[in-house]
Image (cartoon, rainbow, N blue to C red):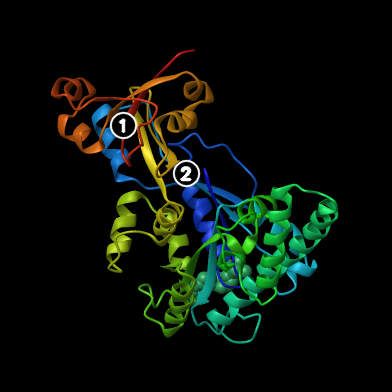
């Protein structure tokens, strides 16, 4: 599953949001074969109307959606990079995630104390991002020491490039800038260095404006502040009301739609977050459809057929012969695989085929 870490200052609504995710997970537990996991992890399905449409035609024993794995990374506070609280442990959790959802408080509520005394989401975001940058600086400094020692008398071009890149990255982050904006990011050694230290401040971020129940559409000026931060970083922002999400997650499907409609919404904030996380990483889905299961699989846009096969099983990738591919629209139009074949829209594709979003696939392989 795609792995997403939820960060933000204390009292901005992370746990409330996470509770909603856990409820959503539990509500789906009967339909989907998810196992129970750590308490700070919730695995939730990515809503995809195409999967439901396919299932409607195939009538399988089970439907398996793509999933997003959310980890609640509480405890990130000013000073975390210095080991304040349980700081370093939380930073290690973030390193394992592919996308960060940064929750910022955009609700006013005198009953909810703010750690800094007043509500200012731009400052809050800055506090967290500074911690991530400081943590990167620490990791980089110690790694650089070691790398420099290795270069003594060495003519290893890759190593020397990595050291040069490391010095450049350190200069950059010491000015308070995130690793994601280091100049000449495609230059020699930088990619190798990133692989090695996996900078926290280079991760993709989705900003999440947690609004009050009285402002479900996010019209508050506090939301604008967050929007400005997101725009400056070239990132996306979603408006979510954590309290409302918690309530929503406990409702049955038809009640959910009614509840959303009453606020003029069509989709829950959590669904938008899951979809955005996909989009942000350039992920697409392909489907397998048979009587046992109709299932969505996640791949990177641009992936070729054998790599897609590898998502299902490494044996299928290794023994890949060809893929029988039907585009989603053709499948829906023809209604069955047999009719697709008869209509000539079932294509035989080889190793070089670049998968398209929504392909319905059957892989042929040698065992
Ligand atoms: P965390 O420390 O970031 O995990 O924050 P919590 O989820 O524990 O929320 C802190 C407090 O803010 C709790 O009392 C929540 O009920 C409250 N809270 C969270 N979201 C909202 C919201 O959308 N509106 C209001 N009024 N309060 C909220």
Quadrant location of residue 178?
A: bottom right
Up/down of 58 relative to 358, above or below: above
Image x and y of residue 156, in percent: 75, 47
Image x and y of residue 135, in percent: 72, 65
Horizontally, residue 90 falls left or right of residue 314, namely: right
The residue positioned 56% from the left and 52% from the top of the image is: 98
| Depth order, front residue of 259/227 | 227
Image x and y of residue 119, in percent: 55, 84
Task: Return the mark for residue 67.
Answer: 2
Q: Looking at the image, which residue sits at the far top?
A: 367
Image x and y of residue 231, in percent: 43, 74
Marks counted in the figure total: 2
The residue positioned 38% from the left and 31% from the top of the image is: 352
State the residue position of label 1.
360
Find out if the beta carbon at label 1 lies less than 8 Å from the nearest ligand 1 atom: no
Q: Tell me the mark number nearer the camera, choosing from 2 and 1.
A: 1
| Depth order, front residue of 225/216 | 225
| Depth order, front residue of 26/299 | 299
Q: Residues within 10 Å of mark 1 (few under 14, many from 20)?
A: many
Task: Return the mark for residue 295.
Answer: none
Give the structural element (helix, strand or loop) at label 2: strand
* Quarter of the render that holds ligand 1: bottom right
Q: Looking at the image, which residue sits at the far left?
A: 343
The residue positioned 54% from the left and 66% from the top of the image is: 102
Find out if the beta carbon at label 2 lies less than 8 Å from the nearest ligand 1 atom: no
Horizontally, residue 276 falls left or right of residue 2, namely: left
Between marks 2 and 1, how big is the CA–CA gap?
A: 18 Å
Does the rendering let one see residue 10? no
Q: Residues within 10 Å of mark 2 (few under 14, many from 20)?
A: many
């Amino acid at each position: 599953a795609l792995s997403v870490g939820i960060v933000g200052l204390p009292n901005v609504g992370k746990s409330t949001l996470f509770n909603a995710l856990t409820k959503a997970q539990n509500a789906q537990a009967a339909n989907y074969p998810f196992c129970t996991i750590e308490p700070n992890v919730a695995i939730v399905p990515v809503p995809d109307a195409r999967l439901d449409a396919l299932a409607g035609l195939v009538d399988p024993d089970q439907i398996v959606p793509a999933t997003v794995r959310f980890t609640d990374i509480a405890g990130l506070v000013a000073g975390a990079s210095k080991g304040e609280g349980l700081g370093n442990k939380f930073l290690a959790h973030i390193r394992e995630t592919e996308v960060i959802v940064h929750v910022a408080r955009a609700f006013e509520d005198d009953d909810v104390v703010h750690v800094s005394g007043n509500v200012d989401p731009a400052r809050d975001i800055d506090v967290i991002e500074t911690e991530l940058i400081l943590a990167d600086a620490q990791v980089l400094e110690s790694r650089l020491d070691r790398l420099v020692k290795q270069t003594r008398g060495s003519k290893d071009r890759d190593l020397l490039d990595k050291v040069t890149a490391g010095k450049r990255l350190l200069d950059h982050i010491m000015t308070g800038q995130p690793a994601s904006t280091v100049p000449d990011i495609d230059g020699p050694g930088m990619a190798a260095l990133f692989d090695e230290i996996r900078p926290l401040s280079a991760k993709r971020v989705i900003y999440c404006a947690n609004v009050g129940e009285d402002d479900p559409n996010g019209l508050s000026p506090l939301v604008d502040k967050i929007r400005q931060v997101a725009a400056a970083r070239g990132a996306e922002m979603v408006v979510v009301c954590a309290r409302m999400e918690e309530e929503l997650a406990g409702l049955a499907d038809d009640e959910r739609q009614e509840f959303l409609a009453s606020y003029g919404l069509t989709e829950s904030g959590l669904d938008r977050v899951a979809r955005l996380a996909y989009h942000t990483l350039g992920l697409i889905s392909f489907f397998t459809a048979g009587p046992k299961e109709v299932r969505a699989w996640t791949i990177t846009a641009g992936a070729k057929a054998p790599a897609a096969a590898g998502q299902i099983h490494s044996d299928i990738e290794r023994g890949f012969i060809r893929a029988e591919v039907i585009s989603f629209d053709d499948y829906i139009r023809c209604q069955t695989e047999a009719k697709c074949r008869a209509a000539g829209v079932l294509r035989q594709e080889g190793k070089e085929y670049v998968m398209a979003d929504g392909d319905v696939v059957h892989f042929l392989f040698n065992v």
